[in-house]
């Protein structure tokens, strides 16, 4: 039986017919972000990436689309959306570029969630609605030059002094660092307990230096932060934050979004490669008509379906309130790595054109090297899952 082009594209996109498992609200939100990405991002993505430009002019529209804090209650600027809605929005953003999804992950999953979960009512009302609209941009400073996988080794301190705290230390690899109005800074108090602080980036002693040498995630702004005796009042402390578990619970939110986002990057690569093989002629026929190409396309589809199923089940667990962080670790680990494999195969299928940013796969491939590393490396998530199954801490 013949199929229209649209139906064929739907088969690539959704080989296992998962569309029926999403609510109409989820499909609407997904399609709105998809249109935004198609119209505003896709035509410029290669150039922005090459030039190292983050499109700040799109932040307001991203806010209007509900991309910042979608799961938070309406009184804080959110939409009370489900985890699956949030996930599919991240999927569509990352279809455009991982750097764009990173911006949203940091704003929502890391910064807004930190204030929502560990802040006072006054802090929530002061910051969250404006962050949801994209008027206040946040960054999240956990990693340090000498403490990445093991954030408990951080050296940044928050000493009690005067009517508040004095913060001293450095953070490295901080997404949005040079764009942010506020930084959520994690530091050890006088008792050595990790606490979170909302630090205005114009506070005396605070500075950010953009890292210019990235060969990955080039559309995203990544910075080093310096805290040179930055004085903040008591109102900067997130009073309910207490210990390493606090920043780690924010990471769970963002890692959840990454598990979906990676599906988007992989889908973009798969679709572009599949279309290319049908028009690229070698040895007198489209390369799509060769067995070795079909094998590689089937492998890509297989990976994408596994990623989609993992993400969907993660979303269901989130919505049932039953999600445990090792489950998020497994999905972040596997989906980031699988997306890398799909992007690499797509790159190969495009031949020489595959290395150009006129096409998506090389840009996605380079970005996904970061996605595989940040928010916990592949190895860190392997060890989280190992510990969960075997009951032994092997870090
Ligand atoms: P451990 O003993 O395992 O944990 C300490 C306490 O925290 C709890 N916990 C979590 N809670 C919620 N979510 C999680 N994911 C959690 N992981 C642990 C845990 O239950 C415990 O609670 P309690 O009550 O018993 O005290 O601590 P550990 O020192 O052994 O460390 C564990 C380890 C290695 C897994 C953790 O340090 C880790 O996840 N390391 C990776 C660090 C990381 O992912 N950094 C990311 C920085 S942010 C970033 O990359 C942003 S990129 C954003 C973008 O651009 O998209
Ligand atoms: P390391 O911890 O030094 O790890 C080096 C290698 O050793 C890795 O392969 C790791 O898996 C391996 N390793 C470490 N310990 C073990 C072990 N016990 N067993 C086996 N292998 C091990 N951080 C933030 O706080 N906020 C941000 O916004 C942010 N954005 C980022 C954006 C970008 C573009 C990048 C690249 C990073 C960002 N990060 C951010 C930091 C990121 O989370 C860290 O890079 C990551 O957690 C790894 O830490 P590390 O780079 O110090 O590597």
Image: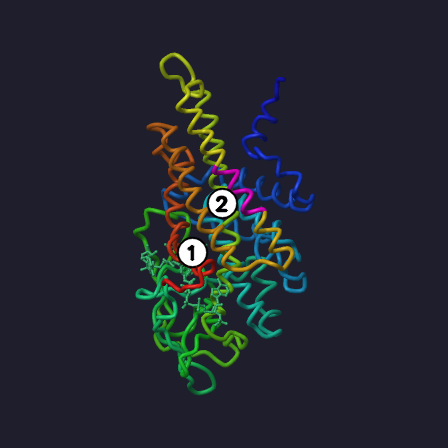
Identify the element where label 1 is drawn: helix
Residue 324 is left or right of residue 383, and the answer is: right
**Callout 2 secondary element:** helix
| Residue named by callout 1 | 381
Q: Position of residue 167 (x, y in %)?
A: 39, 77
> Which residue is pictured at 66% across the width and 58% down the height?
80
Q: How crowded is mark 1: few (under 14 residues within 10 Å), some or many (20 or more)?
A: many
Q: In which quarter of the image is residue 223?
A: bottom left
Q: Can residue 61 be seen in this view?
A: no
Boundaries of the magenta span = 303-312
Residue 199 appears in the picture as rendered: yes
Q: Nearer the viewer, residue 21 or 350?
A: 21
- Residue in view at x 49 percent, y 33 percent: 301
Circle on res. 94: 2
Extreme-bottom residue of the structure: 162
Which residue extends farthest top?
Answer: 284
Q: Quadrant of residue 349?
A: top left
Give coordinates of residue 384: x percent, y percent. Answer: 43, 59
Image position of 349 (left or right of 31): left
Residue 274 rendering spot, x and y as whole percentages: 47, 27
Whether residues under marks 2 and 1 lie with C-beta atoms below 8 angstroms apart, the answer is: no
Whether the residue carrying mark 2 lies under 8 Å from ligand 1 is answered with: no
- Where 193 sits versus 177, above or below? below
Magenta-span inclusion, residue 258: no
**Mark 1 beta carbon near ligand 1 (under 8 Å):** no
Q: Position of residue 65 (x, y in %)?
A: 61, 49
Give the mark nearest the N terminus, 2 or 1: 2
* Position of the N terminus by quadrant: top right
**Is residue 311 covered in magenta?**
yes
- Residue under the image location 55 percent in, 63 percent down: 112
Q: In this figure, which colouring scheme has been used for the structure?
A: rainbow
């Amino acid at each position: 039986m013949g199929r229209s082009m649209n139906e064929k594209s739907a088969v690539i996109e959704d080989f296992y017919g998962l569309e029926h498992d999403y609510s109409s609200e989820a499909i609407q939100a997904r399609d709105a972000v998809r249109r935004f990405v198609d119209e505003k991002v896709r035509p410029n993505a290669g150039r922005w990436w090459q030039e190292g430009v983050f499109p700040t002019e799109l932040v307001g529209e991203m806010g209007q689309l509900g991309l910042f804090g979608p799961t938070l209650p309406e009184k804080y600027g959110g939409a009370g959306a489900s985890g699956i809605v949030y996930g599919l929005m991240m999927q569509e953003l990352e279809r455009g570029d991982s750097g764009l999804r990173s911006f949203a992950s940091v704003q929502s999953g890391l910064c807004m969630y930190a204030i929502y979960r560990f802040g006072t009512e006054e802090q929530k009302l002061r910051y969250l609605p404006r962050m949801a609209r994209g008027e206040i941009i946040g960054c999240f400073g956990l990693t340090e030059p000498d403490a990445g996988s093991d954030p408990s080794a951080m050296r940044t301190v928050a000493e009690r002094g005067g009517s508040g705290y004095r913060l001293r230390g450095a953070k490295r690899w901080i997404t949005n660092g040079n764009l942010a109005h506020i930084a959520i800074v994690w530091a050890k108090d006088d008792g050595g307990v990790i606490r979170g602080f909302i630090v205005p980036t114009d506070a005396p002693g605070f500075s950010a230096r953009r890292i210019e040498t990235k060969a990955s995630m080039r559309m995203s702004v990544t910075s080093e932060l310096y805290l040179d005796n930055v004085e903040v009042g008591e109102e900067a402390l997130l009073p309910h934050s207490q210990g390493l578990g606090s920043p780690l619970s924010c990471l769970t939110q963002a890692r959840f979004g990454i598990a979906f986002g990676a599906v988007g990057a992989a889908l973009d690569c798969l679709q572009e490669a599949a279309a290319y093989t049908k028009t690229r002629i070698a040895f007198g026929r489209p390369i799509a008509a060769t067995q070795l190409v079909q094998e590689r396309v089937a492998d890509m589809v297989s990976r994408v379906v596994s990623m989609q199923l993992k993400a969907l089940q993660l979303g269901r667990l989130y919505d049932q309130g039953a999600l445990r962080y090792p489950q998020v670790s497994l999905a972040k680990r596997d989906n980031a790595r699988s997306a890398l494999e799909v992007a690499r195969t797509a790159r190969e299928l495009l031949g020489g054109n595959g290395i150009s940013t006129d096409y998506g796969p090389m840009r996605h491939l380079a970005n996904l090297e970061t996605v595989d590393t940040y928010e916990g490396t592949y190895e860190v998530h392997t060890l989280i899952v190992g510990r969960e199954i075997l009951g032994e801490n092997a870090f």
